[in-house]
Image (cartoon, rainbow, N blue to C red):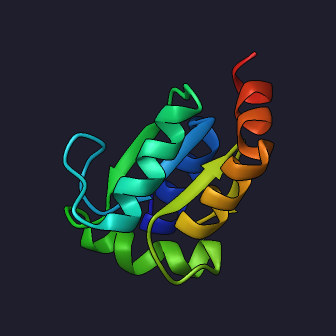
Amino acid sequence: MNIEDKLREQIKENSILIYMKGTPYEPKCGFSARTVQTLIDCESQFSYVDVLENDDVRASLPKISDWPTFPQVFINGELVGGADIIAQMHETGELKKLIDSVES
């Protein structure tokens, strides 16, 4: 299985998945830290992939998602966005509704 197929499978198998720099417990950039905290604030159960530990993921995911930066949040197999979009959705309550619909 090539890396792009592996990424597509990860996205499909995890209802909420964040590709980030670092881990939720030790984020390596402010955008990743803010996005993880937003997911936690929404009481979300989520999976993560540290792109700093996975060069092939960091290089290949932007080709699949058509999104150049990290973090990238996928919900129900769809790219929702990065730090700014997640923050905006959280402010409007849209993110919590989307997460609740996944986890119910």
Does residue 78 lie above or below 102 as drawn? below
Query: Does residue 92 appear to the left or right of 59 in the view shown?
Result: right
* Image location (x, y in percent) of residue 99: 70, 33
Give the residue furthest to the front. Answer: 91
Residue in front for this viewpoint, 2 or 56: 56
Residue in front for this viewpoint, 94 or 9: 94
Residue in front for this viewpoint, 29 or 53: 29
* Image location (x, y in percent) of residue 23: 26, 48
Q: Residue at the location (45% across, 76% down)?
A: 60
Q: Residue at the location (69% across, 21% down)?
A: 103
Q: Residue at the location (63% across, 35% down)?
A: 15
Residue in front for this viewpoint, 77 or 7: 77
Does residue 50 lie above or below 62 as drawn? above
* Image location (x, y in percent) of residue 26: 19, 48
Where is residue 53, by image quadrant? bottom left
Does residue 97 lie above or below 94 as drawn? above
Location of the C terminus by quadrant is top right
Give the residue furthest to the top. Answer: 104
Does residue 56 lie above or below 99 as drawn? below
Location of the N terminus by quadrant is bottom left
